[in-house]
Image (cartoon, rainbow, N blue to C red):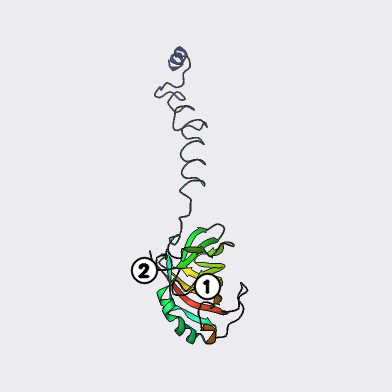
Amino acid sequence: MPALLLLLLGCDDHVSFPGVPGLDDDDATTDDDDTVPDDDDDTANDDDASDDDDAADDDDATPEPPFVNATYCLDWGSVEITEPGGIFDLLTFLSDVFDAAPPILIPTSVDLAAEEIRMDVGVGDDECAPDSAFGTEELTRDGPGSYVEPHFDAGPGEMNLGGSAIELTLQAALITGDFTPSGDAIINGTLSGALDLSEAIGACALISCGPCPDGSDQCVSFAAESATWNRAD
């Protein structure tokens, strides 16, 4: 009897006949369950290479680190300056400058696969927000820094350490440090370069100055470690 019905219906295998093998709604064009490639379970369905679970979707992307586009403010109190010798007299001379204008650091992007990081530097206001009078500069404009979690190494570039009180440029500046897991701070930081004292009248009478990377002659070699940069936003 089933065979006769099949003949009468023109062999339409889209019709469901309970108990008759091969005649249910599991065919290649309408079902959810067969193995023919053009049904709902084939290579075009929600679980294949083009869906939300494959290598090109949002489910296998690595989340952006929490520090990207955050602003970090240098805590001068944490810094141990190792160069130049005789730095105490210089720091006393410049203490008001450093207190009034903390340097800031802004990681603008990171490429985890390439292990690269881009960073801006600037001068902070009273709340460690970027001082609009100075803007920011890209520390990594000559090439990206390196980033291997949690450590970064960026520069050389230029950064202003003096703010509005006086222009103190750190030439060929290099900055390193480790981001905390939460992104709330940068710890174990180092800061180095050639500190241009040409605008700090009388500074070179307190310490021996020498050539600068830009060709001027009133720089001192500057190096600091143990620095902490606190997130300000």
Residue topped by disc 2: 127
- Indicate left or right for 115 with 12 as reference: right
- Above-or-below relation of 8 to 93: above
Q: Quarter-wise, where is residue 223 in the image?
A: bottom right
Q: On the image, numbered disc 1 is attached to which residue? A: 169
Which residue is drawn at the image coordinates 38% and 66% (left, top)? 232
> Residue 178's x, y, as percent?
48, 69
**Which comes before the other along the chain, label 2 or label 1?**
2
Q: Residue flagged by tag 1: what amino acid is it?
A: Thr
- Image location of residue 140, percent across then percent down: 55, 63
| Foreground pick, 75 / 33 | 75
Amino acid found under the numbered disc labelled 2: Glu
Considering depth in this image, is 15 or 38 the residue closer to the camera?
Answer: 38
Mark 2 residue crowding within 10 angstroms, few (<14) / some (14–19) / many (20+): few
In which quadrant of the rendered image does the C terminus lie? Answer: bottom left
Image point (52%, 70%), residue name:
175
The quarter of the rendered structure image containing the N terminus is top left
Numbered circles on residues, count: 2
Figure quadrant of residue 229: bottom left
Could you tell me if residue 146 is visible in this image? yes
212, 143: nearer the viewer: 212
User: Whole-percent x and y of residue 52?
Assistant: 46, 43
Residue 115, relative to residue 196: is it above or below? above
User: Marks 2/1: CA distance?
Assistant: 22 Å
> Residue at 47% of width from left, 77% of height from top?
226
